Each structure stands twice: as structure tokens, then as C-alpha cells.
Image: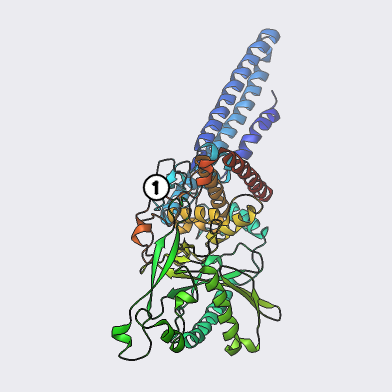
Amino acid sequence: MDTWVLWLLLLPSILQYPQPVGDGLDEVTRLRMEALAKLQEEEKIRLEQEVEQLVLKQGAWAWGDLLWSASQHLQVWALAGLLLLVLALWYLRRERRLRREEHAEENGGANEEGGRNMDANEEAGVNEGGNDGNGEENNNDDGNPQEGNNVAPNEEGGAGNEVAHHDPYDDMGRRVMESIQWPVQDLEKGCRWTTALMEMFAFYFHHVLFNSFYPVLKPAIGVGSAFEGWSPREQDVVYQVLIPMTPPRGHSFHVELATAGQTRVRNFRIHVQQECTCGREQRRKSMLCFLHHPEEELRSNQDPSLLHTLCTDSYLDVQKTARWFYQLVRAVWPALPHAHKWRLVLLPSTRSCQFKVSKGTESYRIEMLFGVQQGNSDIFVSSEPGPYHTSSTIWPETYAVAEMKFFHYIARRAPPDSLHLKCLQFFIRLQLGLGFSTYTMKTIVMHLLSILPPSWWSRRHFVSRLIDICVSLRACVQVRRLNHFIVGNQRLPAGISLPPHVLTAGKYNLFHDLVMDPVVHSHVMSQYADLHRWLKRIIDDEE
């Protein structure tokens, strides 16, 4: 066999070995080395057989030539072995250096090689277990994201080594991000503008409602996606605010659980009762007691009770309250400084007060929700619309304030390049037209945020986190369970307060319909397959 044939045999091994790999490929490297050693042994035996055959055929006169040929082959093998030895030493030295760098970095990260292979993750059952809704690891099958299935990443090319080691995952994350059309509005600016406008409204509301028997309006609280830092819309972002209401003089609010049998949404009624004011008010003669003064005297000398303005059958009426808010906004707007430059357009709504303000090409769409706080907690019953609210006296329980505080908590701990909100926005856009709600994707992301360290949400982990979200959704759909993030969560960050009935409640399954109806479950599994296919196509196109 000629020398150049051996070089052709060795060339693939020299070119392919050793490639820069992580610890996860050590087994592959070992198999390659064993295969190369086997090839060398087979070639040596083959050469010996050729020598024997040639000696028998040609006689002893050929010994000199054969010995010379064999010596040439031995020189080739010696050279190849030397090259392999040098490359192996280089590989081992590089591995030791990388391990020292990994120990020097913070202890965390996601397995980018394993994370990129979505099919491998799913076959391995990633996130098939569940989170108990409290941010803890849980090995039961309740269908929530699970900590135990997230593998640490290969940190090659991380902080401090970006110049020496180019990171392909950072490039992939950048390309995927550039292929997405993000909201064009500056959400932070819009939130500041909306907050300033609400402060102006609150100032004038206070003067207009002073000494009236309408609800007392407290400062607005920014809630919803915009105040959490993301938006499901590309344009026309909605800035939601929640305005807490307290009872006026001579009245009290009593939040009562609505009719039993509500399995998915906790609905309440706000019972309005009149309180005796004889002892404290008559001394100042500022008002008449609704309970102990004749009705004729009350009608002639005092504004009507809240029971006769915004209530239906002694319960606060959402639709009447919404119309009252529209009247307030329309009456107060001309007095605001904004009225000189901005144009107000009231938008139709039966359970909230929605309007748009615009100036030239700049505009903001604002929705004013209203509700009653439960104790001193971050849980309210509000006018927020929902799929199961039909009666105008029904006020669903809302967790918007607690969720907003959770996202602010994450934002304070996240590194400057964190893309957790981009991950959420990506999936909100990806699932448009499918049956998954925005709140479903938001819940899955909140569960993952409570499990994974903030450093795992940087751009170089962007694709891996997208895959985690997709795999978690698949697991939840399969087991037909997605636990509510707030209800029953006893391990929320400090500063988020829950009332006792929410804190100690059982698990609140957002996928209750999938349990009750196998046809719906089969349909949702099909929709997940479409979402998975779209995500895989996006990632494959960018690789």
C-alpha cells in the first residue's frame, strides 16, 4: 500500500479530532480514538500479510525492497502517532483551562447543547414532573415546570472570554431576536406618562367627589402586561391601571363569595350596607344618617345613598360603576393641563373605562379598571372582564397587582441583558391563532422564572429558554394540569401579600377544561404540535 493512501485514511481523523467540545462529548471522543486504534492494528496486520505473500512469490531477493517499504510505512505510522499525541495533549490542556474558567464563573447556566435539541429534551421527559405552584421542585405529575430537569450549561464563550471564544449560541439568539417584530412603543415611557396622567385625574377626582356618597377613589396602580414590562401587541399597547375603591361615609363594603360551584374563577359580589352615623356626624351636622332620618328629609337635604346610584339589589354594579367612571373622565378632562395639547377619545366598554389620548403621531390607549382590596393584601375583586362573568354584580378575583410585583422583583434581580420578557413576548406572538391564551403562556414563564436563576435568561440562553417554555407547555398539556402561579403559592417573594383564603387554597388548575373534555384535550395537543413545529422551524432556520 502506498504512503499517500495512509495519509488519506488519516486525514479525516486529523481534521475532525479534537474539536472544541464540552464534557458531554467525551464518550464520542473515546469511541473515535478506539476506532482509529483498531484501524491502525488492521492496517499493520494487512502489511504483514502482504510481506509474507511477496516473500513466497518472489524469493529472498525481494527482502531488501520489502524491508525498505515496511520501514516507510512504519515512519508514516510513527508520524501519525506523534501528531495524535500532540493533539491529545492540546485537547487535555484546553479542557483543564475551561474547567478552571467554569469554576471561576457563577454557578449556573443552561445546557445549550442539550437545550438546542428539542426532540431530545422531549424524549427525555423534560419538565414532565410538576411544580407545586410555590416555586419548589416537585417530582409529581401535576404538569408544572420542574427544576430537576434543567441541565447546567456549557459556559464556553461566557463573560470574560467573549474575545477569545466566539459564542455561536449568542449569535443564534441574536438572529432569532432580529427575526421577531417587537412592539414599537417605548413601554417604560408610556408607563411613566400614564402614571402622571392618573395622578392628575386623582387630584381632580378628589375635589369632585369630596363629601359625596360615591366610592372614594384611591391612587391608581399600574397593572397588566405594559406595567410588567412586555406587551402582546406590536402596536396600540394598552396601559391598564387598577383604581381601588373604598366605601363613602355612612356605607360599608362586604366582599362575599358568589354562588357555589365556580370551579375555575373565584367570583365575588360587593354587598353595600348603610352604617349609622348618628353618633359622630350629627355633632358636626355634616350629614344625615341614612338609617335613622326620614326618607323625605334625606331626599330634600342630602345627596342619594350609594345604594340608589351604583347598586343593584344592594350589590355594587360593575356596569353602573363603569358608566360613572366615563362621566367622571369626561367631566374632569377639560380641567387637566393635557387637554390643551392632547385629544381624548372615549372607547366603548361595559366593565371598565377605556379611552385613547393622542397628539400628532403619538397616542396612548388606557384602560381604567376598578375594584375593592381584600384586607391589606395585593388581591382585589375587580371589574376585569372574563369569559364567565355575565351578571353585572359579579366581580372576579384578580391577581394582577401580585403578578406585577413579581415581575418587578425579577427585574431587580435580573442582569442587564436578561431576555425573560422577550421570551414571553416571543411565545405570545408564536401562539396567535392557536387555542393557548396569553395568560397560559405568562403562567408558564412565571413558573420558570421562579425556578431558574436570573443569569440563565441572558441572550446566549435565549434559544434554550424558548425550548424550556415549549417543553413545559407540552408537559402541562399532556398531564392536563397547569397550576395557577399565585393561588396557593406560599413561597412568593417578600413584599407580595396574599389573604389567607388565597394563601392556603388548593391547587388551581388552569387546564380544568382539558380534564373534563377529552375532545378538547386532543384538540389542544394538536395545536401544541403546530406550535412546536413553528418553533422548530424558526430555530432550524437560524442555525
Q: Is residue 218 visible?
A: no
> Badge 1 local density, few (<14 within 10 Å), some, or many (20+)?
some
Residue under the image location 52 percent in, 52 percent down = 156
Front residue of this view, candidates 445 and 100 = 445
Relative vertical location of residue 403 with respect to residue 216 in this rendering, above or below: above
Write the residue at 59% across / 51% down: 436
Residue 51 lies left or right of residue 371; in this view the side is: right
Q: In the displayed structure, would residue 115 be above or below residue 9?
A: below
Rendering coords of residue 413 (x, y %): 44, 64
- Residue 179 x %, y %: 68, 58
Q: Is residue 309 visible?
A: yes
What percent of the width, then of the height, locates residue 9?
Answer: 66, 30
Query: Which quadrant does the N terminus fall into?
Result: top right
Q: Give the amino acid at mark 1.
A: Glu
Tell whether 386 sits left or right of 254.
right
Q: In which image quadrant can residue 366 be found? A: bottom right
Q: Quadrant of residue 60?
A: top right
What residue do we see at 63% from left, 52% from top?
A: 431
